[in-house]
Image (spheres, rainbow, N blue to C red):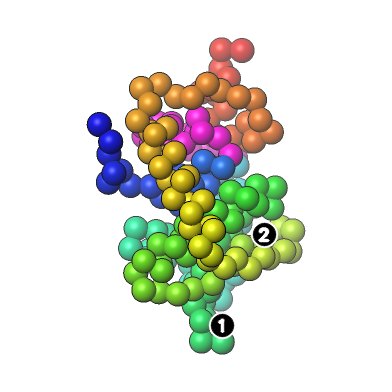
């Protein structure tokens, strides 16, 4: 049976572009190692930088890292440790922008990489919306699977908070 109301989050979008197995684990409420150093570093970076911006604001079903106004336009910021997974970060931010558009809120996005002193502006497009819709449907298919997708060794595994779950038997 299709479940069209299954919620999909920005975090689901982020991990979809990195590891489908991690999406399955999250959607099945299997928590990552909460003491994993990578999670702590991410929280620390988010808290330490951009102190002038409002932080961690919930808008509907999304939680944005930063929000500010620039020249009368709302700018939503997403803070990441590194630009290494820029495609994932960009799609997560586009998901937030698309969600806001559906509420009648037109905003620009800004990816922030404080450790690299980089930022990238992101704007919503019809093409991005189409890609997001496909990703959301695929996330829902992954979540409905009775078992997780096969594990695949990728560079992200080394710092993943699920690495012991996936690779413990080796």
Q: Nearer the viewer, residue 47 or 21?
A: 21
Give residue 97's position: percent from left, percent from top: 47, 65
Residue visible at 52% across and 42% down in the picture: 15
Observer-nearest of 57 and 69 = 69
User: Would you place residue 73 above or below residue 60 in this image?
Assistant: below
User: Tag 1, which secondary structure?
Assistant: strand
Q: Which quadrant holds residue 115?
A: bottom right
Query: Can you tell which quarter of the image residue 120 is in?
Result: bottom right
120 part of magenta stretch = no
For mark 2, does the 10 Å Cα neighbourhood hold few (<14), some (14 to 19), or many (20 or more) residues?
many
Left or right, 117 with reference to 126: right
Instruction: State the SS at label 2.
Output: strand
User: Residue 151 appears at what percent x and percent y?
Assistant: 56, 23
Q: Residue at x 63, y 68 (%)?
A: 121
Q: Which residue is mark 2?
A: 113
Up/down of 18 relative to 83, above or below: above
Q: Residue furthest left?
A: 1
Verify whether residue 22 appears in magenta: yes
Instruction: Find out whether the residues at labels 2 and 1 contact each other: C-beta distance under 8 Å.
Output: no
Residue 24 coordinates in the image, percent (x, y): 43, 32
- Specify which label sits upstream in the sequence, 2 or 1: 1
Residue 115 appears left or right of 143: right
Q: Is residue 166 visible?
A: yes
Magenta residues, start to end: 18-37
Seen at 64% across and 35% down, the residue is: 156
Label 1 neighbour load within 10 Å: few <14, some 14-19, many 20+: few
Residue 70's tag is 1
For this orientation, the residue located farthest to the bottom is 71
Determine if residue 46 is in view: no
Q: Nearer the viewer, residue 62 or 129?
A: 129
Q: Which circle, 2 or 1, is nearer the viewer? A: 1
Q: Quadrant of the C terminus?
A: top right
């Amino acid at each position: 049976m299709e479940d069209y109301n299954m919620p999909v989050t920005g975090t689901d979008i982020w991990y979809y572009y990195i590891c489908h197995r991690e999406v399955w684990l999250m959607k099945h409420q299997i928590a990552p190692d909460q003491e994993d150093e990578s999670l702590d570093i991410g929280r620390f970076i988010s808290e330490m930088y951009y102190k002038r911006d409002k932080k961690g604001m919930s808008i509907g079903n999304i939680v944005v890292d930063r929000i500010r106004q620039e020249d009368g336009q709302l700018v939503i910021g997403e803070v990441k440790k590194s630009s290494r997974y820029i495609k994932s970060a960009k799609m997560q931010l586009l998901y937030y922008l698309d969600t806001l558009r559906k509420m009648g809120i037109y905003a620009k996005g800004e990816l922030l990489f404080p450790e690299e002193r980089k930022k990238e502006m992101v704007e919503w497009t019809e093409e991005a919306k189409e890609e997001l819709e496909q990703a959301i449907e695929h996330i829902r298919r992954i979540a409905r699977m009775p078992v997780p997708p096969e594990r695949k060794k990728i560079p992200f595994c080394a710092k993943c908070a699920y690495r012991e779950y996936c690779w413990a038997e080796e």
